[in-house]
Image (spheres, rainbow, N blue to C red):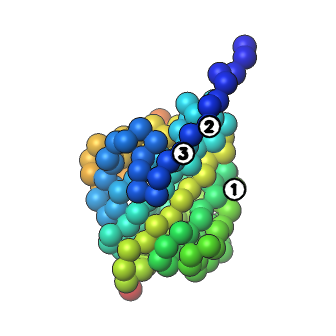
Amino acid sequence: MGKTPIAPFQVARNDDRHAVHRSVGIGTLTFKVTTADSNGEFLVAEIAHHAKGGPPRHLHRHQDEWFHVIEGKYIVEIGDERYVLGPGDSAFGPRGVPHCWANVSDGPGRISFVFVPAGQAEAFFIEITKGNAMAPTDPAFWLPFEMALVGPPLKLE
């Protein structure tokens, strides 16, 4: 079974690959490269934050995740490690390792995520944006997306 050829494309700073507005309550989610674009090899998503916060601690059973801060300040916890990231900084979260992150900027923040392989990450983001909020803290919600909820969001001071 062959893979579909991929054509080049561009996505502008505040744009979504498919020109869809998706809110996660504290920010706007955009897809930069979708699973269809990469034949499921990876997914690139970005959140432009207008408020502090982030998701509860969770893990991806089959995806590695790379975090890259574009603007603002973020705390990213991966396993027992805690990183304070600013513009240009990044961190890597291996599959199966619990992690969470939070925008702690006094102003706007912007962070990109790369999931390899894409798995169910795109479907997960589409589902949470239906509620105009960050992911729910119901463990059952996470299971169909090959993820597990393992703790609360980071406590912001």
- Point out residue 67 in the picture as x, y percentages from the top left corner: 60, 62
Q: Is residue 134 left or right of residue 121?
A: left
SS at badge 3: loop
Q: CA distance from mark 2 to mark 1?
A: 28 Å
Question: Is residue 77 at least partly visible in the picture?
Answer: yes
Q: Quadrant of residue 56?
A: bottom left
Q: Is residue 84 left or right of residue 54?
A: right
SS at badge 1: loop
| Residue extending farthest right | 2
The disc at residue 10 is: 3
The disc at residue 38 is: none
Query: Is the C-beta separation of discs 2 and 1 under 8 Å?
Result: no
Q: Quadrant of the N terminus?
A: top right
Query: Is the C-beta separation of discs 3 and 2 under 8 Å?
Result: yes
- Point out residue 141 in the picture as x, y percentages from the top left corner: 39, 43
Question: Is residue 97 at least partly visible in the picture?
Answer: no
Q: Residue at (50%, 48%) from the top-left corner?
A: 11
Residue 123 drawn above or below residue 66: above
Callout in the foreground (3, 1): 3
Q: Residue at (61%, 48%) from the top-left corner?
A: 115
Q: Amino acid at mark 2?
A: Pro
Q: Amino acid at mark 1?
A: Pro
The disc at residue 94 is: 1
Q: Residues within 10 Å of mark 3 (few under 14, many from 20)?
A: few
Q: Residue at (33%, 48%) from the top-left corner?
A: 22
Q: Residue at (49%, 78%) from the top-left corner?
A: 73
Q: Amino acid at mark 3?
A: Gln
User: Which residue does the numbered mark 2 point to in the structure image?
Assistant: 8
- Point out residue 117 in the picture as x, y percentages from the top left corner: 66, 40
